[in-house]
């Protein structure tokens, strides 16, 4: 038996998986976000821990015998959050999260202090990443910075509470801007640029490696005769990739979650920071990945649904199963700014091309297409980094819409696969990492791909029509940047 935990932003999710990779039970405990000022986003690490305990306790109530037989635990988690601990391991302040925008000025400072940052860390300095947050803390909360002995990411903090040891793995560490992503080791120069050293960092291991064992008292709480091994784990997207079996070069997926990710697994370090492509380590040894990230994907449809006071499914139903032509309206999905390819936290969304015939269905389709065009920007950015794709799986809540996948296939010019359990999430991938850490099995033996339900091919006629619409979409960002940012 293997246990996967996903320390998300909105909830802690737990999944119990048997030796045949069958999911026996799942639980979920919600979390709240604090926004003490505009642009700030924080959580109390103690809330993650209490939600973790509650989630595993709930699994015990459902499957006590199976939980008692767990051999390994794996962690997935929200990336980039800064958990600051003092010398005794106590939390010094609320964690600053991935979607916190306070450190834009500090990003520029970091890049000026460490000109080699882009090549070493493989990424531009984004406010969401961890390193700029520490410059902000040093500037605005110097007494907290002076007492900071360790900096952990969210899932590593939960791992610390489970085991008493501070350990991090490569995929999550890649999102700090402190990792030398090619060498898979902390960068002393990057750390020095934020006033830190590797003494402030946890030790590094691979995501599929055994980190340590959980404490005996927790094992007793959950009826485990032998304390399970804790795996290194993975950042949320890397855990999702492990769950999909996307561990070989050329494997790709589109994630239509709250935000959007276009993922490509690579067998080499291939950064392209100028286009805001993320180049990170994978959770599997000697493997990397590239990601294009858009900040509003399914959340754009969620916003439109709330504005119309109509459920998303009811909005989509009149559109049918497949697009017949592009919408006459264009939508910029920059409701929270954008990462790839613009790295612009100030830009905002817009509808363009409205007339008296613009119906609710016209605008709903435009929202779906705007997200698809943003993914096309990501695909082009990956191509500029030397990565080409021939197909991709589609995951996340948006994968339920066959119409949306059809739009994406035509915009991207790629066959897209609808898969079984497309909303499985990071906890299942974390359970796979737990299995590898506990048994020593090879990734290719454990990380099997899910069953593909259907492949949606691009229509050549629609592909051409959408290419023309995407060209107009691309022209809107520079034209409107000074107007709607």
Image (cartoon, rainbow, N blue to C red):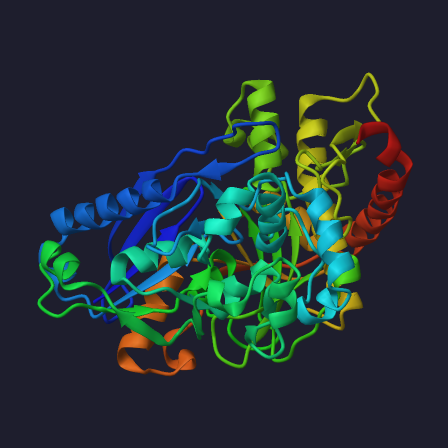
Quadrant of the rendered image containing residue 415: bottom right
- Please, is residue 412 above or below residue 445 in the view? above
Q: Say which residue appears at 62% left-offset and 61% top-offset.
A: 177
Q: Is residue 331 left or right of residue 402?
A: right
Quadrant of the rendered image containing residue 323: top right
Is any atom of residue 391 visible in this view?
no
Is any atom of residue 373 visible in this view?
yes
- Please, is residue 359 above or below residue 425 in the view? above
Quadrant of the rendered image containing residue 262: bottom right
Disc tally is: 0
**How far across and how far down the image is residue 318, in percent?**
60, 29
Give 394 or 54, whichever is nearer the viewer: 54
Q: Is residue 124 left or right of residue 28?
A: right
Give 75 or 100, whichever is nearer the viewer: 100
Quadrant of image for the N terminus:
bottom left
Q: Say which residue appears at 64% left-offset and 79% top-offset.
A: 268
């Amino acid at each position: 038996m293997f246990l996967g935990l996903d320390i998300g932003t909105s909830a802690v999710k737990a999944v119990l998986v048997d030796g045949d990779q069958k999911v026996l039970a799942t639980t979920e405990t919600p979390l709240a976000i604090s926004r003490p000022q505009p642009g700030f986003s924080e959580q109390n690490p103690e809330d993650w821990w209490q939600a973790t305990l509650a989630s595993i306790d709930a699994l015990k109530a459902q499957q006590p015998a199976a939980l008692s037989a767990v051999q390994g635990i794996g962690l997935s988690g929200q990336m980039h959050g800064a958990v600051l601990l003092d010398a005794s391991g106590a939390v010094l302040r609320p964690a600053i999260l991935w979607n916190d925008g306070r450190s834009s000025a500090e990003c520029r400072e970091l890049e000026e202090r460490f000109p080699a940052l882009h090549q070493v860390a493989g990424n531009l300095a984004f406010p969401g990443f961890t390193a700029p947050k520490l410059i902000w803390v040093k500037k605005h909360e110097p007494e907290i910075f002076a007492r900071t002995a360790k900096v952990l990411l969210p899932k590593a903090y939960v791992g610390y509470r489970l085991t008493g040891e501070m350990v991090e793995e490569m995929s999550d560490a890649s999102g700090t801007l402190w990792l030398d992503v090619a060498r898979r080791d902390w960068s002393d120069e990057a750390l020095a640029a934020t006033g830190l050293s590797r003494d402030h960092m946890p030790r590094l291991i691979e995501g599929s490696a055994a980190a340590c064992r959980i404490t005996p008292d927790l094992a007793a709480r959950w009826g485990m005769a032998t304390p399970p091994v804790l795996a290194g784990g993975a950042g949320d997207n890397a855990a999702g990739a492990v769950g999909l079996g996307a561990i070989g070069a050329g494997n790709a997926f589109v994630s239509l979650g709250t935000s959007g990710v276009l993922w490509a697994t690579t067998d080499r370090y291939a950064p392209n920071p100028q286009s805001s492509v993320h180049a990170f380590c994978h959770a599997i040894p000697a493997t990397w990945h590239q990601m294009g990230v858009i900040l509003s994907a399914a959340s754009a449809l969620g916003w439109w649904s709330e504005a119309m006071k109509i459920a998303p499914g009811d909005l989509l139903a009149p559109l049918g199963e497949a697009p017949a032509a592009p919408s006459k309206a264009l939508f910029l999905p920059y409701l929270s700014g954008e990462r790839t390819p613009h790295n612009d936290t100030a830009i905002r969304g817009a509808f363009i091309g409205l007339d008296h015939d613009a119906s609710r269905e016209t605008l709903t389709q435009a929202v779906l297409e705007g997200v698809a065009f943003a993914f096309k920007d990501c695909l082009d950015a990956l191509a500029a980094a030397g990565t080409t794709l021939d197909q991709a799986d589609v995951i996340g809540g948006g994968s339920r819409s066959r119409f949306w996948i059809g739009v994406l296939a035509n915009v991207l010019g790629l066959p897209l696969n609808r898969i079984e359990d497309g909303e499985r999430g990071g906890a299942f991938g974390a359970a796979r990492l737990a299995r590898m850490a506990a048994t020593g099995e090879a990734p290719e033996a454990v990380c099997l791909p899910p069953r593909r339900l259907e492949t949606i091919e691009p229509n050549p006629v629609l592909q051409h029509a959408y290419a023309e619409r995407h060209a107009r979409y691309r022209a809107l960002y520079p034209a409107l940047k000074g107007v709607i940012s």
